[in-house]
Image (spheres, helix red, strand yellow):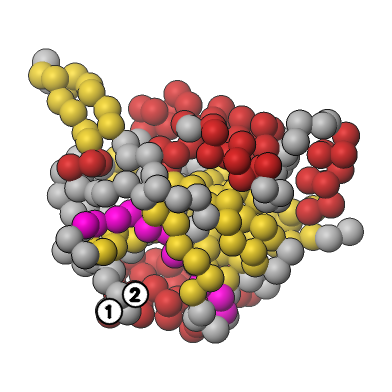
């Protein structure tokens, strides 16, 4: 049997990356004790800004912020996967997922394609959240290979766009990541359903690392980071709070699913 132990770090990121890194480092120490080498992080784990402004702590080329993220993998000897940081590319700001090996080598990156846009009413007034006011959308899929894991990368609002995941499944991934900062109202309504659906329809494991808690006066995220099997079974649910959750993935099970139910 081919089995891999994985972990998700769920935190409440604030604007200050130093404070966020302290939290992550503490939970990485816990993962080390458990012997978990594959660690997945949520969206904007490095620095959480408001909904209409970018963080001032932008990753750019191999600046201090890039090196700080890279060091998390190197100093702890883990694969650091899926999590995103706001990144400056030319004149644009990208929501970019970074993936590092235990020696700090960059495996690959993915830029969020589907930017969150929502109209809502608050205190009797119509308001709008539009990530495109801050970020520039990416245009390309990204699959990385990490040991026995063939991983299709995605970020938060991508979760609602199933053709991306269908494409990944056609290319033979056995795991999908969804680094997220899912808001509370949409999280309560749709998070578990959508994550399980992506697992079932692609016959892949899904690791959905979410932010949790009150980040600032405008951002309140749902938590409930999930590890889900290709059958749609929830293997781990972080629920509320800052924590590490882990699960063992039976990669042969994904193969058995595809041999049993012929979708792709």
Q: Across the whole image, how many numbered discs are drawn on residues?
A: 2
Query: Which residue is painted at 11% across and 15% down in the image?
Result: 124
Q: Is residue 234 left or right of residue 20?
A: right
The answer to whether the residues at label 1 and label 2 have Cβ atoms under 8 Å apart is: yes
Residues under labels 1 and 2: Cα distance? 5 Å
Query: Which residue is painted at 27% across and 79% down in the image?
Result: 63
State whether residue 160 is above or below residue 168. above
- Measuring from the top left, give residue 204's x and y in whole percent: 69, 44
- Measuring from the top left, give residue 48's x and y in whole percent: 27, 55
Q: Which residues are magenta?
A: 92-102
State whether residue 72 is above or below residue 231. below
Q: Is residue 250 left or right of residue 98?
A: right
* SS under mark 2: helix
Is residue 211 visible in the rendered structure shown here?
no
State whether residue 67 is above or below residue 231. below
Say which residue label 1 marks: 63
| Magenta-drawn stretch, dominant element (helix, strand or loop) | strand
Choose between 47 and 148: the one closer to the eye: 148
Outermost residue on the top side: it is 124
Q: Which mark is residue 23?
A: none
Question: In which quadrant will I find the N terminus?
Answer: bottom right
- Measuring from the top left, give residue 95's x and y in whole percent: 33, 54
Choose between 241 and 224: the one closer to the eye: 224
Image-quadrant location for residue 67 = bottom left
Is residue 124 visible in the rendered structure shown here?
yes
Q: Which mark is residue 66?
A: 2
Query: Which residue is painted at 75% across and 36% down in the image?
Result: 264
Q: Is 101 included in the stretch rendered in magenta?
A: yes
Q: Is residue 158 left or right of residue 198?
A: left
């Amino acid at each position: 049997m081919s089995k891999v132990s994985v972990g998700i770090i769920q935190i409440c990121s604030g604007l200050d990356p130093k404070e966020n890194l302290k939290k992550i480092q503490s939970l990485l120490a816990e993962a080390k004790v458990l012997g978990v080498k594959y660690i997945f992080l949520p969206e904007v784990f490095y620095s959480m800004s408001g909904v209409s402004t970018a963080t001032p702590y932008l990753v750019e080329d191999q600046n201090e912020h890039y090196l700080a993220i890279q060091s998390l993998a190197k100093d702890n000897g883990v694969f650091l996967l899926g999590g995103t940081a706001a990144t400056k590319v030319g004149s644009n700001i990208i929501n970019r997922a970074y993936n590092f090996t235990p020696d700090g080598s960059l495996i690959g990156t993915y830029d969020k394609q589907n930017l969150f846009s929502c109209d809502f009413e608050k205190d009797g007034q119509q308001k709008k959240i539009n990530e495109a006011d801050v970020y520039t959308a990416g245009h390309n899929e990204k699959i990385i290979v990490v040991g026995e894991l063939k991983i299709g990368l995605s970020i938060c609002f991508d979760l609602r766009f199933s053709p991306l995941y269908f494409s990944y499944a056609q290319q033979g991934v056995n795991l999908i990541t969804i680094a997220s900062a899912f808001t509370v109202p949409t999280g309560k309504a749709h998070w578990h359903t959508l994550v399980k659906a992506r697992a079932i329809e692609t016959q892949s494991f899904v690791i959905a690392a979410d932010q949790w808690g009150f980040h600032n006066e405008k951002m309140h995220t749902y938590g409930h980071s999930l590890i889900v099997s290709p059958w749609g079974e929830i293997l781990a649910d972080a629920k509320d709070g800052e924590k590490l959750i882990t699960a063992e993935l039976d990669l042969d099970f994904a193969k058995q699913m595809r041999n049993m139910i012929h979708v792709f």
